């Protein structure tokens, strides 16, 4: 009761975009029983995301700490919430036709995406361990279910169970680290934890144990080595549209959580965690890229690619300066557009009796559907970091941040890894442009897929050619957020 008495109208206003998603999600569950044409539920979910984005836009110039310091509404939170909403909208757009083919078009699918997005938005604004964990579990539980959404598919069920078990294990490790931090500081607020850690010796074993267990939990969430094993199986078994959602939205939310914790709560331990993170970054980039070379399944190949990209993003944390943190936000924004574009083309390949998940399924795509092949080529060039695409800007900022802060060896290793990635991305390109078509029928792109591909290609090229507004947006989020 005391908590309710202290909640103000301003506090409630701070979470209106999240509440709006929850309301739309609950209505979707009810409408699922009433609506026969299930595709309309997808449009209703898109309307919910648009409404949430509108409320978020109205909060763009507002900055305050809500719920007694448990939640922060600042440019950093708003920037990442925008990424989550974009990723959710594009994922739903590519789901509409895909779910019809899989005969799994149900209202709870869209509702779960909205609930997961709501959890992510709480994670981005959380400056308190309890708020952060509630947001994390809201996202995670919805995602576990979505991974196993193809109920009649054994591979999907297995992936969901594996993801759930390993996710629960990592959450336990994360909670253990959080409990140690609470024991040290007597508070769950990040600023109080940072103050308590700064008063203790830098070699304090309890502080180091808290940092290590917390880092292990975080590395699992972002699929960094050696906690990455769940990623290929979960990506392969999940519905392709959900793989797309996981690869951008869940990853962005996990990194937003990491920025808050590492740059605020355990920042006094930076000399210790930066060494660990440098080693993890190098292993993640290298193992992710080398493992991707051997994959013939596109979903597994992109899963290992996603792991390597997590390694690149960790460079921003290691640099820790304005350029590095700007690069983290900018890279995740770019990755959202680029990766959704790649997955949209893979979803387009899925037709009755054609799975479209192997590199061989893309053979001769240029001769069947030149537009889809050229779009895929541009998205892959962006993932590889080749100009003038957006991916080049993202990698340039990360590598520049490493050099600015004297991490030259790390920058060289990252550049070498980027060169390795060109090889496996171009395996797909060679298959599309230089091999005979094994499947003679062309592709039929549904309106939702067209919209997602259109948005993805426009921003992939726009950010690459004219990046200034997007760099300024990411820098604004970092400067005022920290």
Image (spheres, rainbow, N blue to C red):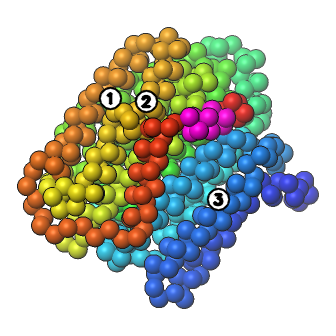
Give the residue drawn at x 42%, y 68%: 448
Give neighbour class at mark 3: few <14, some 14-19, many 20+ (Cα, 10 Å): many
Tell me which numbered mark, 2 or 1, is placed earlier along the sequence: 2
Q: Would you name the residue on which mark 2 appears?
A: 395
Magenta-tinted stretch: 468-477
**Relative to 83, is 186 above or below?**
above
Taking the image as shown, residue 472 lies to the left or right of residue 98, namely right
Between the residue at mark 2 and the residue at mark 1, the CA separation in whole angstroms equals 9 Å
Which residue, given by chain and number where applicable, does mark 3 sit on?
Answer: 53
Q: Do residues under tags 3 and 1 come within 8 Å of each other at their CB atoms?
A: no
**Element under disc 3:** helix
Q: Mark 2 and mark 1 in contact? Answer it, CB < 8 Å.
A: yes
Secondary structure type for disc 2: helix
Residue 418: mark in rendering: 1
- Disc 3 versus disc 1: distance between alpha carbons? 34 Å
Q: Residue at coordinates 44% horizontally, 38% vertically from top-left?
A: 464
């Amino acid at each position: 009761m005391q908590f309710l008495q202290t909640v103000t109208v301003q506090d409630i206003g701070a979470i209106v975009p999240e509440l709006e998603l929850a309301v739309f999600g609950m209505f979707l569950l009810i409408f699922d029983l009433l609506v026969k044409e299930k595709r309309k539920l997808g449009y209703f979910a898109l309307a919910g995301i648009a409404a949430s984005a509108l409320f978020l836009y109205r909060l763009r110039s507002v900055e305050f700490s809500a719920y007694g310091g448990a939640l922060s509404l600042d440019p950093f939170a708003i920037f990442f919430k925008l990424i989550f909403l974009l990723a959710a909208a594009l994922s739903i757009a590519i789901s509409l036709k895909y779910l019809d083919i899989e005969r799994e078009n149900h209202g709870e699918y869209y509702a779960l995406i909205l609930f997961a997005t709501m959890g992510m938005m709480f994670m981005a604004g959380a400056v308190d361990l309890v708020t952060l964990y509630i947001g994390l579990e809201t996202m995670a539980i919805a995602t576990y279910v979505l991974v196993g959404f193809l109920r009649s598919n054994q591979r999907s069920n297995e992936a969901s169970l594996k993801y759930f078990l390993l996710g629960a294990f990592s959450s336990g490790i994360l909670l253990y680290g959080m409990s140690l931090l609470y024991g040290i500081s007597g508070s769950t607020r990040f600023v109080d934890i940072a103050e308590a850690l700064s008063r203790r010796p830098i070699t304090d074993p309890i502080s180091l144990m808290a940092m290590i267990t917390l880092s292990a939990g975080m590395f699992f969430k972002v699929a960094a080595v050696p906690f990455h094993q769940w990623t290929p199986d979960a990506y392969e078994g999940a519905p392709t549209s959900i793989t797309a959602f996981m690869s951008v939205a869940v990853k962005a939310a996990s990194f937003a959580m990491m920025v808050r914790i590492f740059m605020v709560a355990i920042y006094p331990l930076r000399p210790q965690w930066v060494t660990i993170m440098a080693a993890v970054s190098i292993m993640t980039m290298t193992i992710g890229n080398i493992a991707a070379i051997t994959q013939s399944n596109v979903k597994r190949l992109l899963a290992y690619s996603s792991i390597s990209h997590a390694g690149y993003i960790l460079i921003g944390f290691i640099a820790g300066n304005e350029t590095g943190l700007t690069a983290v936000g900018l890279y995740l924004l770019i990755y959202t557009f680029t990766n959704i574009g790649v997955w949209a083309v893979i979803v387009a390949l899925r037709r009755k009796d054609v799975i479209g998940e192997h590199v061989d399924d893309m053979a001769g795509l240029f001769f069947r559907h030149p537009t889809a092949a050229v779009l895929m080529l541009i998205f892959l060039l962006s993932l590889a970091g080749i100009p003038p695409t957006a991916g080049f800007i993202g990698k340039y900022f990360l590598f520049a941040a490493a050099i600015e802060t004297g991490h030259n060896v790390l920058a060289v290793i990252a550049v070498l890894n980027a060169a390795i990635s060109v090889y496996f991305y171009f395996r797909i390109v060679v298959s599309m442009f230089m091999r005979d078509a094994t499947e003679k029928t062309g592709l039929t792109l549904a309106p939702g897929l067209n919209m997602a591909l259109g948005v993805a290609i426009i921003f992939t090229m726009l950010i690459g050619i004219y990046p200034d507004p997007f760099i300024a947006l990411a820098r604004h989020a970092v400067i005022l957020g920290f």
